[in-house]
Amino acid sequence: MQEIVVVGTGFSGSILARKVAEELNIKVLIVEKRSHIGGNMYDEIDKGILVQRYGPHFLNTNKYWIIDYLSKYAELFEHNNKLLSYIDGKYVRLPFNFQTVQQLITPAKSELLLSKMRKEFYGRDRVPILELVEHQDADIRNYGELLFEKAYRTYISKQWGIPVEKIDRYVLDRVPMAMNYDERYLNKDFQYLPKEGYTKLFENMLNHPNIEVVLNTDAIEHIQFDGSNNIIKYDGHEIKLLIFTGAIDELFSLKFGDLPYRSLDIRYEYYEEDSVLPSEVVSYPQAEGYTRKTEYKKFNYKRDVTHSVVAAEYPLQYNRNASIGNIPFYPVTTDESTGIYKNYLLEVEKYGNIILCGRLAEFKYYNMDICIEHAFEKFEEVKNLLCV
Ligand SMILES: Cc1cc2nc3c(=O)[nH]c(=O)nc-3n(C[C@H](O)[C@H](O)[C@H](O)COP(=O)(O)OP(=O)(O)OC[C@H]3O[C@@H](n4cnc5c(N)ncnc54)[C@H](O)[C@@H]3O)c2cc1C
């Protein structure tokens, strides 16, 4: 009997597979429906440039043990991710910070506002945009509204496909304003990238005698549920444990309805020039169709080519049957989708031997650091279930 089946080779599935194989010395089958490992962190060389095929991924964390852990599988280098935003025909700093205030309302007009912000938000590094918009001071509020209208409203509605008023507040809170001149997109202490890319890191993580990796295989076509006896089978054989990191609605044949996700159509532009964008990532809140562009060579560890490639992200609704937009990237959490998700959770609980882990299975917006931390916590559940 195959003891454990893991579905998905992103961070969630790969970390759990490695820990089960290494620490519990149990054989694991890890099944991936794409033609490669690494989930959304997958990267490959394109004309001499390391390109991340599912959008740019920067490792940011306040917990050094995460960097330490990943260093077992790849050499990492320090890289502080810096972004610009293109607003009203000029590039301004993102995170929106004190420099952005000067860029958007002129240095002369910013003096009073900056002093008010320093006083009102004393001791705070970053402040969510809605706190500015809802502030009692009219100058702070007016600036918050200006930023909200010029950047957040358009970006968010393009990204999520719903009016900004309907979006979960925490989505807006993810891009707060820096109350200083900090240029780092995220104010996390440890910011790194793998020198040779994420795919190499995943190859090393999955390279263990107890791990068998199967690609190009939709696990759902091989999983059978015996609801009356609460038994799970893979290819007709009963398994002890299913670790699932894919979309939970698909695992149960959409029986409680589809869960909504946003997807991306990533379009590539190839240039003969050495440098194309003024920053490695540029956000375009006011552009038609696309939200941001990434120039990969700007954060490649090796930069030995004189041409460049830029990827533009066009968000669209996820549709599993379409030729474009058939990858679920971002779970769209609304009251309705949360309700549907809860029904799937109840179904999972009936079996007692399904572990859900990751962005899709848990229907939550996890960054990689949280995802890694979470996989470690889930491993404790795995041990309890297997009584080891
Ligand atoms: C555009 C974009 C940019 C991001 N940038 C950052 C960033 O800069 N920093 C950061 O920390 N985080 C970032 N993230 C978040 C990061 O991608 C996630 O934290 C991470 O992908 C979650 O890993 P996971 O293993 O849970 O999911 P995934 O990486 O999605 O892995 C799930 C895997 O399961 C496979 N699968 C699904 N269903 C099946 C099935 N039925 N059978 C077989 N295989 C299946 C999928 O093909 C996939 O490989 C970004 C996300 C996106 C979308």
Image (cartoon, rainbow, N blue to C red):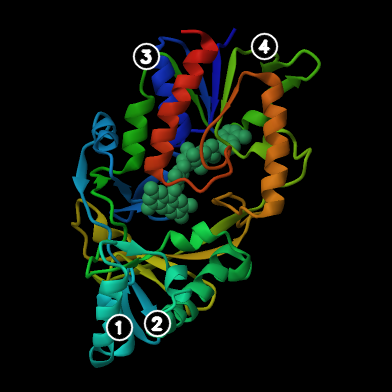
In front: label 1 or label 4? 1
Q: Given contact means CB atoms under 8 Å apart, are the residues at marks 2 and 1 in contact?
A: yes
Residue 328, position in %: x, y?
A: 58, 49
- Say if 88 sits above or below 340 in the image: below
Residue 348, position in %: x, y?
A: 67, 27
Q: Quadrant of residue 300?
A: bottom left
Q: Give the Cα distance between marks 4 and 3.
A: 24 Å
Q: Given contact means CB atoms under 8 Å apart, are the residues at marks 1 and 4 in contact?
A: no
Q: Is residue 266 visible?
A: no
Q: Give the Cα distance between marks 2 and 1.
A: 8 Å
Q: Given contact means CB atoms under 8 Å apart, are the residues at marks 2 and 4 in contact?
A: no
Q: Which residue is mark 4?
A: 237
> Observer-nearest residue: 174 or 12?
174
Q: Which residue is mark 1?
A: 113
Q: Residues within 10 Å of mark 3 (few under 14, many from 20)?
A: few
Q: Which residue is mark 3?
A: 23
The amino acid type of the residue labelled 4 equals His
Q: Give the Cα distance between marks 2 and 3.
A: 53 Å
Q: Which residue is mark 2?
A: 143
The first of marks 1 and 4 along the sequence is 1
Residue 71, position in %: x, y?
A: 24, 33
Q: Quadrant of residue 334?
A: bottom right
Q: Give the Cα distance between marks 1 and 4.
A: 67 Å
The amino acid type of the residue labelled 3 equals Glu
The amino acid type of the residue labelled 2 equals Tyr
Residue 116, position in %: x, y?
A: 29, 79
Q: Give the Cα distance between marks 2 and 4.
A: 62 Å
Disc tally is: 4
Q: Secondary structure at mark 4?
A: strand
